[in-house]
Image (tube, rainbow, N blue to C red):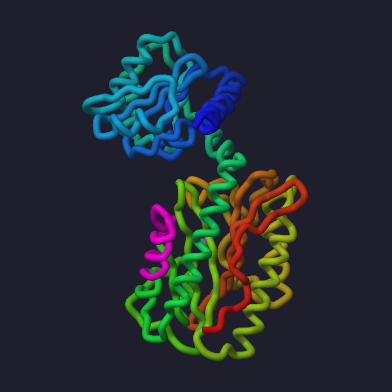
């Protein structure tokens, strides 16, 4: 427990370092994910006022027991009714002048209420994406959690595919995948599981429908678990029947693109270079126009986090980032092929965390 406690205060210290550099007195954190990142509190209703000398976590009576048990914050305040007035009352007792809030997470109404209630001397300004940047570099215990989530996800994939029957619908298989995830200890799927058969696979974010999984057609499965708070993400392709030469050659092209992108991952390399590595391979195969999304994304407490691995992402990758590598091609009326792993950026290169083999799975 002590190790965990110090991890949360270490995260707050990093935020304080940024605040000192920018002469900011206090931060109001309102997104539940960032409150969780800074305190470990997982309740759905919270506000955090934090500064080097004063940190108070506010929640409502439904979470009174939970906040005592799990939150690492110097002060915790259980508030009846709206939390904002309690936070403003605390602010009034301080001499804080430059107060920042999460511009991309606070609703206009809350901002309005906040700006009319804060003491006159206080200047409100947006914090910017510093918490999201801090979150993009994972600590050793977060890497362990992501590794465990990835392994759980792959085990759920194996268990569900063992139960595959030709008469299944997309929804049946998606339900089986989700069921296996939960049985293996996931809190819930990290996102809506995608199962897409035949031409439906041409929709990168297909929702499983009530249609039977076709024989002699590609089957795309994109799934991730949320386990101990951390997400995993994997896409694999299966084929019930006998794949044609076209299916095999297109599959090989996407796999080659995915491997080239993984090869390009390394501390210090701009994310866009990884994206270009995948695109260059698909161009050689005449398929680059079919690759209609970015190569990957960070993941952690959320399924989509910083960094973005796209064409215009000039941000360098850093050791400790957990990202996905997921090039794909989408051909209307025919289907889609995507191969996705969860990958850890290291000083020397990368470590592919996903243990599931990448061959086209013939069912
Ligand atoms: Zn995915
Ligand atoms: Zn993904």
At horizontal 54% and vertical 59% (from top left) the residue drawn is: 151
At horizontal 35% and vertical 75% (from top left) the residue drawn is: 172
Horizontal and vertical percent for residue 255?
66, 72
Horizontal and vertical percent for residue 165?
41, 83
Asked if residue 346 is positioned above or below residue 101 in the image, the reply reads: below
Asked if residue 328 is positioned above or below residue 44 in the image, the reply reads: below
Q: Is 285 in front, or is 18? A: 18
Can residue 34 be seen in this snapshot? yes
Identify the image quadrant of residue 82: top left
Q: Is-magenta flag for residue 188?
A: yes
Q: Is-magenta flag for residue 248?
A: no
Q: Horizontal placement of 295 versus 335: left or right?
A: right
Asked if residue 145 is positioned above or below residue 221 in the image, the reply reads: above
Q: Horizontal placement of 276 versus 292: left or right?
A: right
Horizontal and vertical percent for residue 163?
42, 77
- Residue segment shown in magenta: 175-191
Horizontal and vertical percent for residue 311?
65, 56
């Amino acid at each position: 427990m002590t190790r965990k406690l110090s991890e949360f205060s270490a995260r707050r210290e990093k935020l304080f370092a940024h605040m000192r550099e920018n002469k900011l007195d206090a931060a109001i954190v309102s997104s539940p994910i960032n409150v969780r990142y800074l305190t470990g509190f997982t309740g759905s209703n919270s506000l955090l006022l934090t500064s080097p000398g004063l940190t108070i976590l506010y929640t409502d009576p439904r979470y009174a027991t939970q906040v005592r048990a799990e939150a690492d914050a110097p002060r915790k305040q259980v508030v009846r009714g709206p939390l904002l007035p309690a936070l403003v009352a605390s602010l009034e007792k301080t001499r804080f002048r430059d107060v920042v809030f999460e511009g991309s997470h606070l609703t206009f109404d809350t901002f309005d209420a906040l700006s009319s209630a804060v003491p006159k001397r206080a200047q409100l300004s947006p914090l910017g994406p510093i918490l999201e940047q801090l979150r993009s570099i994972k600590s050793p215990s977060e890497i362990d959690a992501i590794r465990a989530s990835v392994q759980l996800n792959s085990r759920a994939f194996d268990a569900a595919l063992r139960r595959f029957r030709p008469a299944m619908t997309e929804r049946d298989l998606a339900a089986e995948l989700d069921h296996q995830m939960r049985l293996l200890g996931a809190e819930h799927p990290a996102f809506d599981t995608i199962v897409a058969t035949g031409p439906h696979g041409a929709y990168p974010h297909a929702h499983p429908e009530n249609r039977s999984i076709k024989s002699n057609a590609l089957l795309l499965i994109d799934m991730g678990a949320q386990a101990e708070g951390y997400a995993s993400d994997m896409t694999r392709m299966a084929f019930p029947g006998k794949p044609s030469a076209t299916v095999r050659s297109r599959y090989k092209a996407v796999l080659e693109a995915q491997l080239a992108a993984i090869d390009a991952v390394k501390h210090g390399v701009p994310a866009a270079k990884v994206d270009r590595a995948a695109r260059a391979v698909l161009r050689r195969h005449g398929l680059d126009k079919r690759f209609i999304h970015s190569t990957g994304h960070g993941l952690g407490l959320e399924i989509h986090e910083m960094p973005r691995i796209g064409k215009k992402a000039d941000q360098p990758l850093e050791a400790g980032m957990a990202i996905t590598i997921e090039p794909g091609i989408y051909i209307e009326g025919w289907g889609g092929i995507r191969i996705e792993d969860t990958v850890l950026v290291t000083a020397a290169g990368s470590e592919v965390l996903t243990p599931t083999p990448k061959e086209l799975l013939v069912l």
